[in-house]
Image (cartoon, rainbow, N blue to C red):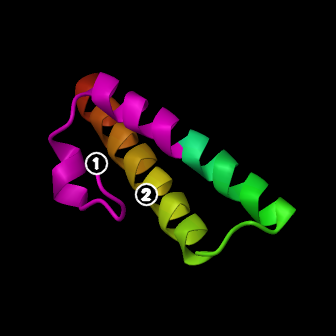
Amino acid sequence: MKSKQRFADLRVLSTDQLSDELLKLKKEQFNLRFQRATGQLENTSRIRVIRRDIARIKTIAARQRDAAAK
């Protein structure tokens, strides 16, 4: 998916798809942090966008777990 994912777009994903997306974003976050540390990062705002996308996915996953528990 593209950056700055819409909340509604993420809600339709399954739990497995969400975990795959989360893993992909965490890898990208690691790479961005590494680039920042070595002085190679040009678009510093990308770190913030990735961090917020990770939070969105974690929120949706928690809501799905709560809904499944009921």
Where is residue 68 shown, x and y percent of the image? 25, 25
Nearer to us in this view, 30 or 66: 30
Is residue 21 shown left or right of residue 23?
left
Q: Is residue 24 inside the magenta stretch? A: yes
Q: Is mark 1 on a helix, strand or loop?
A: loop
Please tell me whether mark 1 or mark 2 is closer to you in this view.
1
| Amino acid at pointer 2 | Asp
* Residue ID for mark 2: 53
Other-residue count near label 2 (Cα within 10 Å), few / some / many at <14 / 14–19 / ≥20: many
First in residue order: circle 1 vs circle 2: 1
- Badge number at residue 14: none
Nearer to us in this view, 46 or 16: 46
| Amino acid at pointer 1 | Met
Q: What element carries label 2?
A: helix
Q: Which residue reaches farthest front?
A: 40
Q: Is residue 20 inside the magenta stretch? A: yes
- Badge number at residue 1: 1
Image mark count = 2
Quarter assignment of residue 65: top left
Other-residue count near label 1 (Cα within 10 Å), few / some / many at <14 / 14–19 / ≥20: few
Magenta stretch bounds: 1-25
